[in-house]
Image (spheres, helix red, strand yellow):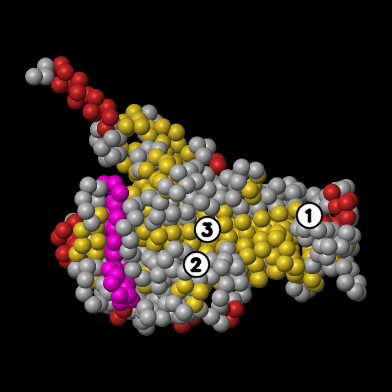
Amino acid sequence: MRTPALFFLGVASLMAQNGTVAGAFHVEHPTLLNLGFEWRIDGDANRNATVEVRFRKVGTQPWRPALPLLRIGGERVFRERESMSYIVPHGFAGSILNLEPATSYECEFTMKDPDGLSGTTQQRVTVATRAEPKSYAGGRVLHVYPNDHEGPKQEPSFIGLKAAYYGEGRGDWTAVRMKKAQPGDTILVHAGLYRPERLNYVDPLSAPFTGTWSLSLKGTAEKPITIRGAGDGEAIFDGAGNHKLFDVMASQHHIFEGLTFRNTEVAIFAGEKEVMGAVGLVVRNCRFEDIGVGVWTESAQSRDFYIADNLFLGREDQMRLIGWNQAGQRTAGIYPSHQLRSFFAVKVYGPGHVIAHNAIAYFHDGICVSTYGPPDADPELRASSIDIHNNDIHLSNDDFIETDGGTHNLRVFGNRGVNASHNGYSAQPMFGGPVYFFRNLLYHVPLGNALKFNAAPAGILVFHNTFISEQGGRDPYSNAHFRNNLFLGKDAPNRGIMSWANATSSFSSDYNGFRPNRGGGPQYQWLVPGQSMKEFTTLAEFRAGTGQEAHGVELDFDIFEKLSPPNPAQRHRVYHAMDLNFKLKANSKAIDAGLVLPTVNDLFAGKAPDLGAIELGQAEPHYGPRWIDWMPFYR
């Protein structure tokens, strides 16, 4: 029998484990629209601590609530093939969403725990969102012309980019850099074809043998080095089939704007893992065509990229949707699986990147975070605080967007994806999270799921998406929370509409709308630790058996003004976004059926937020580049 003293010691020990000790607080790299934060803790074994968040513009009085930080920690992220295993450190992480660019905000975080707190339990910081990068107005203007240019030139003038950027030097002398560009310089590239004669020892464009321009100078945030089309016609950098057109992984604060890149495997390479990465790279208003990769960095030292308003056109099949070659699917129906002629349009690692308003078509994947592996202990060397938004992705042979390898505060929002052979939006894996998937559209994913959650990702928030697809699978994932989404099945044979495979006891799902597949069979699957997978035919049965989706609804395609599902018997068919209408019909089951989520849906129009990506009565988001009518390139 325990003595009273031992009993009280045991109670005190338990309370100490359940109480929370606040640790280091970290402000992540700001983006233009969002701010991310991390807060380490010890204790809180019963996971009932919370962090409330509020914010306001500097100089204003009223505070606004934001979503609470997500409690993370203890989840195991693993992938057996690569012998990768990672335990998420305990803490909180989260974002304040949908802010204004170039604006300072006062942000307050209050930790609470009924079991007791110690350490600094309230944090108040002032953080500014970034402004869109701009060229320096007071620098030199250098004029570049192709080697076959005839006619007058603006001075100072140079033949080819290398001469303006580093100074003259051909053959063995390309390494001599005696007249380098300076921070703040603008290099105007005049109309013409810039195609290195790489087998010419004295190539007029100074890129002998490789046909690659390696740019390594250092601009500054205030005085970037700008390489811009002069506006007198198309300025085309053509790799003549080479491996790499530009290597900028040692550069800082460079802007590429208004240029065309084509006929190369890698257009802009910006960082090698464990070597070095670029800082402050801007690629804006450019066209990429006949390429294997658009913009690519694997380096944790890369940071604060801005890849926006570009058109990326790969080499994959434009007339049919064909998956990649894998065991058990050596062919896709009557068509052979593809051989990876174009890998991805954009792939990044490191903090603070923004990838927005790009149009992407005919790649294996659209936009990716590097599957770098377990993150570094240094928060400055992680894939964190990354925004991927308002991109329009057409015909991916694998997935639209992959956040695979991300750590904290990845925000995937306002994107439209049409035709992905395997899956739509991926977290394979996420090392703690949160990753936010909100207000995304998806249509026609014949072989996989709306969301790909493999390698035991942890920390997933799924809000306000419209997915014309099933969400199946038994691969486990942790700490996932679903609100205000639409999952509409397309009557695919032998498929349910929704599967939750929870690897831990942290999960929730409510206020979502489902269209079950017709033809009978289980439509809802539910897995929690220590139990076998449970199956349910109706949402009512699922609700009674799990306690989830107390406010969920079953609905059908009549919730839309005019939208039909893709034909599951024609999985190779290509659909076009211009033919699809995702707007909700007034008075349908999806109207006013959602939950208020601060900073996500504050501006809802009715009695409550609508389900799905597009609120009735509000303008549809602008998908893809804001500077061209890019749709004709897809047909």
Name the one closer to the observer, 399 or 557. Answer: 399
Residue shown at the point (30%, 80%) measured from the top left: 558
Find numbered disc 2 in the image and state the secondary structure of the residue it sits on: loop
Circle 3: residue type? Cys
Residue shown at the point (50%, 46%) measured from the top left: 373
How many angstroms separate mark 1 from mark 2 (CA)? 44 Å
Circle 2: residue type? Trp
Q: Are marks 3 and 1 in contact (CB under 8 Å)?
A: no
Residue shown at the point (40%, 51%) measured from the top left: 455
Measured as percent of width and height from the top left, residue 107 is found at 44, 44
Name the one closer to the observer, 373 or 183. Answer: 373
User: Where does label 2 land, which residue?
Assistant: 324
Residue 512 painted magenta: yes
**Position of residue 33 in the picture relative to residue 51 (left or right):** right
In this rendering, the label closer to the viewer, 1 or 2: 2
Name the one closer to the observer, 604 or 318. Answer: 318
Seen as rendered, the residue at the extreme left is: 1
User: Where does label 1 land, which residue?
Assistant: 185
Measured as percent of width and height from the top left, residue 158 is found at 87, 61
Q: Disc 3 or 2, which lies upstream in sequence?
A: 2
Q: Disc 1 or 2, which lies upstream in sequence?
A: 1
User: Where does label 3 land, which residue?
Assistant: 368
Where does the magenta region start and end? 487-513
Circle 3 packing at 10 Å, graded few (<14), some (14-19), many (20+), is many
Q: Looking at the rendered structure, which numbered label has been put on residue 388?
A: none
Residue shown at the point (29%, 46%) measured from the top left: 504
**Position of residue 201 in the picture relative to residue 279 (left or right):** right
Circle 1: residue type? Asp
Q: Disc 3 or 1, which lies upstream in sequence?
A: 1
